[in-house]
Amino acid sequence: MSQFGATITGTGSSVPEHRLTNDDLARMVDTNDEWITQRTGIKERRIAKDGETTASLGTAAARKAIEAAGLTPKDIELIVVATITPEMVFPSTGCYIGAALGIPGVPAFDMSAACSGFIYALATGANFIRAGQYKNILVIGAETISRVTNYKDRGSCILFGDGAGAVVLSRTTEPKRGLLYNSLHADGNGGDVMVCPPGSRKPITAEMIAEDGQYMTLRGREVYKFAVTKFEELIHDAMTKCELTVDDVTLIVPHQVNQRIIDSAMSKLGFAAEKAYVNIDRYGNTSAASIPLALDEAWRAGKIKPGDHLVFVAFGAGLTWANAVVRV
């Protein structure tokens, strides 16, 4: 066992100003506000304008998290960014954020685990701290999903939005504080359920663009079934491994995938609906940004206090799924 733990000392988030409402989408594809709201819980989502990028949103969220932690950018020793919509293929988004923060020389890299990415990045950062290598690490989930969304496809374009969330992970020697448990999983056999093709397997071509093949696609029914199953499994696993009861858990911060999925799982597990922090109605699914964005909102709204147990759960393309238990 390491003598060090990794605890969240600051949170931050950033979203574009531009709102895309369900009524706006109804003027673009064959859909309507009632249909979207009933099936997903989403009313609007934020969309990045020209000049707003994954790195710019991530940088803004990072600045707020660093300030909330009582630190300066120069106190950060490592940057880990979870994203599936990076600034470019290379350099990494983390490198762009490090430059924007004015901390050249600080190691930075990206992680790609889709909607599970933030928990993957959180676990990675925590292990660097447990190993004694770093004291303060910036972990960011940032996405501009609108850049890979096909706004002719009503089955997917209604779901996604842009945004970023960040946390500062800091070293602690306090027992039973910080990241107490996490599990990470993947099954590439389900990789075709949610995909965004351009890459070495399918290089981008004029023909691909002519057929809108550069955009993300998903099989909604299979995604729904997968998420329903994993939501319950992950929360049950987290509570069992940490010997937590329903009363011990202050807040569940889930990946914002679907209001119906969240409500169903909470009910089956015996949780009151208000124990899940949900903002999908205002932001839609922001992939790797969804958990840190929701966490920051909950923290700043006073819903989290020292000693509270938080449970994070996520599932996404890969297929990937992950959970984490944090005691603040």
Image (cartoon, rainbow, N blue to C red):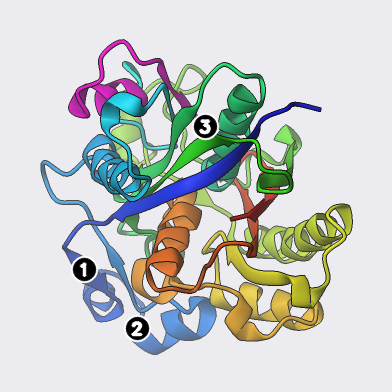
Residue 84 image position (x, y, % from top left): 44, 37
Q: Which residues are magenta?
A: 93-111
Give the left or right position of residue 97, taking residue 241 as reference.
left
User: Residue farthest to the front?
Assistant: 174
Depicted 166 relative to depicted 242: above or below: above
Disc 1 packing (10 Å; few <14; some 14–19; many ≥20): some
Give the left or right position of residue 264, taking residue 48 as reference.
right
Label 1, label 2: how far apart the Cα atoms are: 16 Å
- The quadrant in which the C terminus is found is bottom right
Instruction: From the image, tell me which residue sits under label 3.
Output: 112
Look at label 2 and name its amino acid. Asn
Q: Which mark is residue 32?
A: 2
Look at label 1 and name its amino acid. Arg
Task: Identify the element where label 1 is drawn.
Answer: strand
Disc 2 packing (10 Å; few <14; some 14–19; many ≥20): some
Label 1 or label 3, whichever comes before in sequence order: 1
- Residue at figure coordinates x 44%, y 71% from the top left: 280
Depicted 74 relative to depicted 13: above or below: above
Label 3, label 2: how far apart the Cα atoms are: 33 Å
User: Residue farthest to the left?
Assistant: 50
Give the left or right position of residue 91, taking residue 134 as reference.
left
Magenta residue check for 247: no
Disc 3 packing (10 Å; few <14; some 14–19; many ≥20): some
Instruction: From the image, tell me which residue sits under label 1.
Output: 19
Which of the 4 image quadrants contains residue 98?
top left
